[in-house]
Amino acid sequence: MPVQHEDEDEDHLRWKQNCNKCFEEPPFKMKCKNIPESCQATRILGRRYTLTTTSHKYLEIGLNVQSVSVVEIVLGDNRGKQLTLRIDTWGKLMENRGAIQRLLEVSKPSYFLL
């Protein structure tokens, strides 16, 4: 166990022990249900872009700070539902954005356009 400094209390030590358990595995293998709430990544420098005129759906891009900082791209709505996209998935979407825009612009979408 690390040396306790005078300014550290029991809660802080308990938090440090829990966080050390969280980051034993690489981030892509971690399961959210095993991570204590106080130890989840903090999103900073985030920006939210609305995807609909009513702002019900959005795209949020932010920097998550944990043991390794990563860029996180999230599709979400105002009901609290979120879908986190991996960076390689985002890259594929950007490669095919023309086809996706054509698909979204037609009144009766044909899923064979992609």
Image: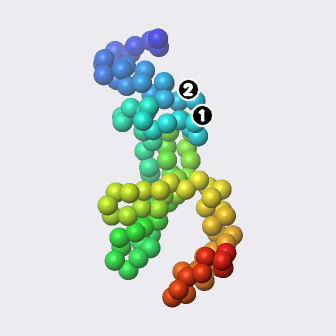
The amino acid type of the residue labelled 1 equals Pro
Q: Depth check: give the residue in front, 18 or 29.
A: 29
Where residue 26 appears, as percent x and y from the top left, is: 60, 34
- In this image, 41 relative to 14: left or right? right
Q: Which residue is mark 1?
A: 26
Q: Residues within 10 Å of mark 1 (few under 14, many from 20)?
A: few
Q: Residues within 10 Å of mark 2 (few under 14, many from 20)?
A: few
The amino acid type of the residue labelled 2 equals Glu
Under circle 1, the secondary element is loop
Vertically, is 18 above or below 46? above
Q: Which residue is mark 2?
A: 24
Query: Residue at 34% across / 57% down in the picture?
Result: 80
Under circle 2, the secondary element is loop
Q: Depth check: give the residue in front, 96 or 40.
A: 96
Where residue 96 appears, as percent x and y from the top left, is: 67, 72
Q: Residue furthest bottom?
A: 107
Q: Depth check: give the residue in front, 71 or 109.
A: 109
Which of the colour schemes (rainbow, by chain, secondary structure, one colour) is used? rainbow
Q: Depth check: give the residue in front, 57 or 106.
A: 106
Query: Residue at 55% across / 56% down in the picture?
Result: 85
- In this image, 59 relative to 71: left or right? left
Is residue 7 visible to the viewer in this orientation of the structure?
no
